[in-house]
Amino acid sequence: MRPKLSIPCGCSAPPSGSPKSEVHDVAGIKVLTAMQTRKLSRIRGCRGQSLVETALMIPLLLLLILNAVNVGYFFLVTLNLTSATRTGIEYAIEGSSTPSNASLPAVTGSTATTVSSLISAELGSLNSGTLQVRICSLSLGSSTSSPPISSCSPGGTFPSPDPDPEWSTSPGFALNRVDVSYKFNTLIPATPFNLIVASFPTCSSSSGAVSCTFVRHAEMRAMGS
């Protein structure tokens, strides 16, 4: 039994009744028959078809991959910003009632021990956009109303701090609040690579560039003064 010949790329095999392909030796030179010449032409044609298909698929693959990169960066910034806000408020409430028995930390300033510096450090290398931070803390004072409202540092336009929810049963407490607004551009600015991110409600497109703005806040009761 003769082995079956596999025809690549879906090329059709010659009819069973067609004459067999032969190689003639003319003066020591092997000459291909017309049948074999047609087979070689089909093989070359199939290879060219594969190249065309690859060339058509590469732009679609790049479109999917680069859109995925921008979406991944979007969620990375979201997680880091939420974590920075939470870390900032946890540090801002550590006053005289904590084991360190220290006063509430400074809100703003150039030193690394301030709340605003901690938030910037928490964002790390992602802090390349427009960052606005407002901190409301008892270290800045409070209102004379009942319940008292913590005073806030300048920075951005944010809602007023909420009163302590347990003031009626446990008077004398106030809430510290941290507000963070962060505006950033996507990693790959071209519009075709921001089709998904541009559809998010926190993002907008202008002149081919897509920017997103996140606003996060956290409130906790100050532990001492």
Image (spheres, rainbow, N blue to C red):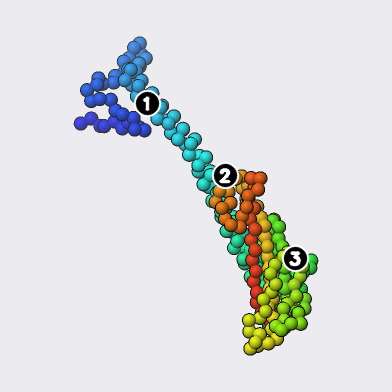
SS assignment at label 3: loop
Q: Quadrant of the C terminus?
A: bottom right
Q: Residue at x 70, y 67 (%)?
A: 158
Whether residue 18 is visible here, answered yes or no, is: yes
SS assignment at label 1: helix
Q: Quadrant of the N terminus?
A: top left
**Residue 86 vertical position relative to residue 11 in the rendered view, above or below:** below
* Sequence-earlier tag: 1 or 3: 1
* Sequence-earlier tag: 3 or 2: 3
**Residue 93 vertical position relative to residue 10 in the rendered view, above or below:** below
Q: Nearer the viewer, residue 179 or 107?
A: 179
| Number of other residues with Cα within 10 Å of mark 3, as a class: few under 14, some 14 to 19, many 20 or more | some
Q: Nearer the viewer, mark 2 or mark 1?
A: 2
Q: Nearer the viewer, residue 31 or 170?
A: 170
- For the residues labelled 3 and 2, the Cα–Cα distance comes to 35 Å
User: Where is mark 3, residue-wise?
Assistant: 155
User: Where is mark 2, residue-wise?
Assistant: 192
